Image (cartoon, rainbow, N blue to C red):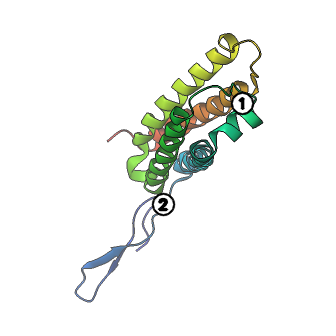
Amino acid sequence: MADKVGSTQKSAGPEGTALHAGPSIVPEVMQTLKRMLYIQAAVWASAGLALASVPRLVLVTIFSQRGDQQFAWVRLMGLQALGLAMVMVLVAHRVEELWWWSWAFALVTVGMAAVAVLNSGFGIPAGESSVFWWILSGVTTGFGLGLLYGLFAASQEQPNP
């Protein structure tokens, strides 16, 4: 018997018991959120790995930031970004059931965007390049808008549990 799109099909065993759930078809509106989570997770994992392993190269050499700072904090933030990316992938894998968990990622991303935009406009010290902060502003604003759109679309398809 064919089920509706987005449902889980069960295959029956010899006694009619369900052996396993077949693959579910993720509705198109959930695909938007799922895609956004995967893309953001890839960017955060890449940036986190770079910041955790070679912070001086990334910040001082590539983005012309001050080199007289303590990089242990930057390494910690890189590890946090890597961990956040892993959780994003876990939520994306089960987006039909856990889509509303993405509000946590949206909150963090919108907050990061606000800080990056404000720092880009008002907090850059003299002699320091603002390229890094404007790139971060653009990326986090884009991700924030993408997550909010995906959450809006997902909430139309499937209300909060």
> Which residue of the protein is positioned furthest toward the front in this rendering?
68
Answer yes or no: is residue 153 visible: no
Nearer the observer, 110 or 43: 43
Q: Secondary structure at mark 1?
A: helix
Residue 95 or 106: which is nearer the viewer?
106
Q: Residues within 10 Å of mark 2 (few under 14, many from 20)?
A: few
Q: Quadrant of residue 75?
A: top right
Q: Position of residue 16 (x, y in %)?
A: 25, 83
Q: CA distance from mark 2 to mark 1?
A: 39 Å
Please tell me which of labels 2 and 1 falls first in the chain: 2
User: Mark 2 or mark 1: which is in front?
Assistant: 1
**Residue drawn at the location 44% of the way across and 54% of the way down:** 90
Residue 38 image point, x, y percent: 57, 51
Look at label 1 and name its amino acid. Answer: Ile
Which residue lies at the image location 71% right of the left edge and 29% below the top edge?
132
In percent of width and height, residue 78 lies at 54, 41
Q: Which residue is mark 1?
A: 135
Q: Secondary structure at mark 2?
A: loop
> Quick check: 124 left or right of 10?
right
